Image (cartoon, rainbow, N blue to C red):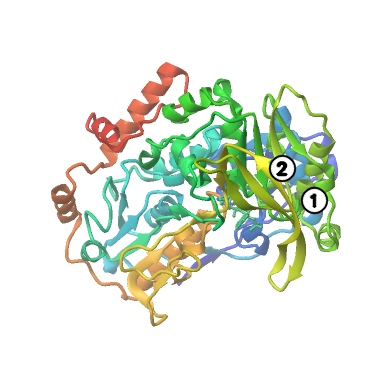
Amino acid sequence: MALTVMRPLVTEVCDGCHTTKMAYVITQRCCNDASCVAECPVDCIRPTPEQREFANTEMLYIDPDTCIDCGACVDACPVDAIFSEDELSASLARFADINAAYFQRHPLEADLAPMAMPARPPKELGTLRVAIVGAGPAACYAAEELLKRADVEVDMFDRVPTPFGLVRAGVAPDHPGTKGVAGMFETAFKRDAFAYFLNVEVGTHISHEELLQHHHAVIYAVGASTDRHLGIPGEDLPGSSSATDFVAWYNGHPDHADSVYDLTGERAVIVGNGNVALDVARVLLLGPAELGKTDIADHALEALRKSNIREVVLLGRRGPVQAAYSSSEFLALGYLPGIDVVIDEKELELDPASQALLDDSEVEPSLTLKVALAHEYAGKPVNADNKRIVFRYLTSPTEILGSDRVTGVRIAHNRLVETPSGLIAEPTGETETIDASLVLRSIGYRGVALGELPFDDARGVIPNAAGRVLGADGEPLAGVYVSGWIKRGPRGVIGTNKTDAQETVEHLLDDFTARKLTTPTEDRAALIKLVEQRQPEHVDRNGWRAIDRIERERGKAAGRPRVKFTSVAELVAAARKH
Ligand code: NAP
């Protein structure tokens, strides 16, 4: 049975003394994993994972009137997103108001919901053995959760020789703080209860059935490894590519190290305006002085050093109210050195339905800010010497132009129409052409089917009920679970995976406790023997530590956080140097 304890009540609420005391402020790189929430002694961080607002919030916020300036949240934050009000840099200063605005809309109330203390499986069931396929944030949060909740052995598999998935190969290089979450996982994974089997591909080196012979359960946390397509003429021309591939290339993913991007033209177009599109726009324009301080792959740094691109146009098919970027990332664009954000005020005119969303008394401050920032950018003078990120709204590509390579994009202008599923874009009939030599579609990641496991092709996810994988008959498959983007689709930031993983692990432990899982016939020693035979180049914890150490040493010599190895052969060779 689950134990319950009450959350600490807010015992002291500052009565207007906000001007004389400092508060902590959550800023741009909040990862939403809510590690800070449980640590706050006055319970002033919202929304909590138990609240309805948590599912869609862009970030978490600290109530400045209740914060007692103790700094407990700072220590708990895995991505260094929390600062004292008086330490905010110019680019983060507005976050003090952004935090306060959340509480004007959602006044702080003590969270009296009992905090469930999760039950541990009974001791007599012995050690639970779990295989986790994937080593990205969803996999790591699941492993961390298992390690603190049970007598457990966790074996983590990844087909590349490095852990941390999109933390290493997805997070933009100019966001080093976000990568700090890996440090939290490293600490949790020091125990012998945890083992890495990196450079081992499930389905090639070891089968699903073999995983189940060695474990009570398998959690697939494989993410969404491909991207969506536009389905328009010219999409396959040289010079047209996916933003997800471009991201993997600049982050040194071994599958993309040999890709070549033609950066000789002056303009690139990105289709879509989510946070990935913003990441790519920054990386295309930041220049070697900024990028040379990061862990960007050497091949990308070299190519971008020679790049002629001066303007990146982002095409949003809907309006500024529906833009997919988060307001904090949009705000940060305004502080990039030598780069202007350009918006035509005319494209900010709202249709009545979007205006109504904005005028609603219950509008989220993050949405109000998003639109206010767009007007601020539209009102700013443009410096002709600067590079530019141009936001276009209500525009969709209809054709990528060029005969043997991309020369431009034909776009249709849209209006928004109300449908039962929300406001969607519909062409007005007006079109225009934008010259460009590079087009990157950034319209979302997509999960891929895995061997014989069930797959929902329409959604790109493995069908599941809160983490339990469902068979064709709609019943849970014994011992098979999912977590992360392959479970819920490619939405949410790194920390979103924490609550997602907790849900999956909760159900796995319930099934173990209810004796629904088959006891494995083989142990970890047998697994290591099998993997040694099938994949002698597998990388274990010592191997990963060696890679990490050498990459950091190379980075130190170059004044960078790390210099990445980008081929499997180099990574395996480095792993052998432990
Ligand atoms: P996303 O947020 O889902 O954005 C996808 C964009 O593509 C939207 O603008 C969408 O427009 C547009 N789109 C979809 N289909 C389209 C089509 N057929 N034609 C034109 N436009 C189309 O996806 P993402 O940028 O790949 O990000 C994935 C997740 O990772 C997000 O949750 C994101 O916040 C997160 N992430 C966060 C960070 C960060 O915090 N710094 C960085 C990177 C990624 P509609 O809205 O009209 O569908």
Camera sees residue 118: no
- Counting from the top left corner in percent of width and height, residue 345 is at 84, 43
Q: Nearer the viewer, residue 445 or 392?
A: 392
- Which part of the image, by quadrant, shows the C terminus? top left
Secondary structure found at label 1? helix
Where, by quadrant of the figure, is residue 276 drawn? top right
The residue positioned 48% from the left and 27% from the top of the image is 303
Q: Nearer the viewer, residue 23 or 215?
A: 215
Where, by quadrant of the figure, is residue 576 drawn? top left
The residue positioned 45% from the left and 53% from the top of the image is 226
Q: Could you tell me the amino acid type at mark 2?
A: Phe
534 is higher (above) or lower (below) than 426: above
Q: Is 415 displayed left or right of 297 in the figure?
A: right
- Counting from the top left corner in percent of width and height, residue 481 is at 38, 66
Where, by quadrant of the figure, is residue 108 drawn? bottom right
- Counting from the top left corner in percent of width and height, residue 573 is at 24, 31
Q: Is 201 displayed left or right of 255 in the figure?
A: left
Q: Could you tell me the amino acid type at mark 1?
A: Thr
- Which part of the image, by quadrant, shows the N terminus? bottom left
The residue positioned 28% from the left and 52% from the top of the image is 201
User: What residue is shown with label 2?
Assistant: 391
Q: Residue furthest front?
A: 403
The residue positioned 80% from the left and 41% from the top of the image is 344
Mark 1 neighbour density, 10 Å: few (under 14) some (14–19) many (20 or more) = some
Label disc, if present, on residue 368 of the rendered structure: 1
Q: Is 464 displayed left or right of 19 in the figure?
A: left
